[in-house]
Amino acid sequence: MQDYGLEHLSQMIYNYCGLHYKDRLTSLKEKISKRLLELGLTSEGYCMYIQTTPMEWEVLVELLTINETYFYREENQLNECCHTILPLLKTKIRNRPLRIWSAACSTGEEPYTLAMLIQETGKFLPGTVEIVGTDINQKVIRKAEKGWYHQSSFAFRRIPDHLLNKYFTIENGGYQIKPSIQRMVRFQHLNLLNENKCAQIGEVDVIFCRNVLIYFDQKTIKRVIQNLHRSLAPGGYLFLGHAESITDMDLGFQKVDAAKTFYYRKETEQNETVSHIGG
C-alpha cells in the first residue's frame, strides 16, 4: 500500500466522521489491510471504491471504531445524574417527558443503564422518559436494538447483581433486557458531525457523550460540541469522559464540580452562575 493512498483515505475518513488518522497511517493500514485483500484493491483503489460505493462506509466505520463499553460504566457520573440532576429536572419539567441523549452509545449498555437507574429512582412514571441512543456504526445499533447480550460478555463486569436480576431475563445463553426498559430507549444511526441529523434528535435535557472526543482533533471537537450544545435545553447537562475537557474552549458551557466527578451545564441567556446542588 502506498502512503499517498493512505493519506488520501485518512483525509476522507476525517471529512466523513472526524476520526484522525493523518499521523497514524500505520494504524490505519493495519485496520484496513484485511478488507483490501478481500476486495483485491490498493489503498488508492479503495479510495475510489468508497466514492462509487457509499455503502462501504458502513464496513469501514465498523473496522475503525472501538466499541468498548459495559453496563454501569463510570458509576460516579451515573449517581450524580440520578441523585442530583434528575430531582432538579423533575421539578423543572412538568408538561413533557424527560429526554436524554446517549451519543456514541455503541451496543446500548449506556442508555439501558440510564433507563434502569431512572426506573430505580421511582421519580418518573412509565412513558415520561425518552432516551435516544445513537452511534455511527450501524452494526452496533442493530445489536443494541435487540437488547440481548451473551452471558460471558464483559458488558456485565460492573453491573450490580440486583439490577441484573431485576431487569434481565436469561434467554439462549445470554441476558435479554426486559421490555419495560427497552420501551424507554430508541436507537438510531447518527454521525455526530452531521448538524442536520443532530438537530433531528430534538431538544434534550441531558447528553452523555463519553470517551468520544479523545479520538478527535480540536477542530472536530468544537464541531461536535456545537452540535450537542444546540440540542441541549437551556441549562441542560453534558457528561463527557473523565479524560475529556472543554473548560477552556468557550463553547457555551460552564463546568460543574461535584464531589467525585465533574460535568458541564449549558449556559443560559442570563449567563447565570452554576452551583452544584448540595455542594
Image (spheres, rainbow, N blue to C red):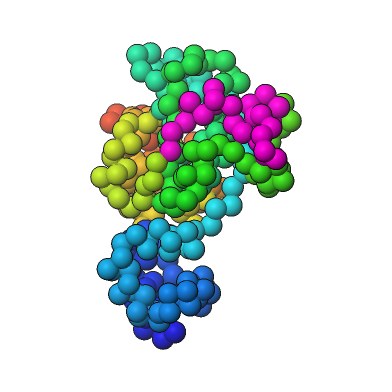
Report the side of 34 relative to 161 (left or right): left
Q: Quadrant of residue 57?
A: bottom left
Report the side of 77 relative to 63 (left or right): right
x then y, percent, for residue 237: 43, 34
Q: Residue furthest bottom?
A: 2
Segment tinted magenta in the rendering: 164-187
x then y, percent, for residue 203: 32, 31
x then y, percent, for residue 247: 44, 47
Is 47 above or below relative to 169? Answer: below
Q: Quadrant of residue 127?
A: top left
- The C terminus, quarter of image: top right
Q: Is residue 76 magenta?
A: no
Residue at 48% x, 77% y: name it. 37
Q: Is residue 181 magenta?
A: yes
Residue at 47% x, 51% y: name it. 139
Q: Nearer the viewer, residue 148 or 107?
A: 148
Residue at 32% x, 46% y: name it. 226
User: From where the camera sits, is residue 222 visible?
Assistant: yes
User: From where the camera sits, is residue 82 visible?
Assistant: no
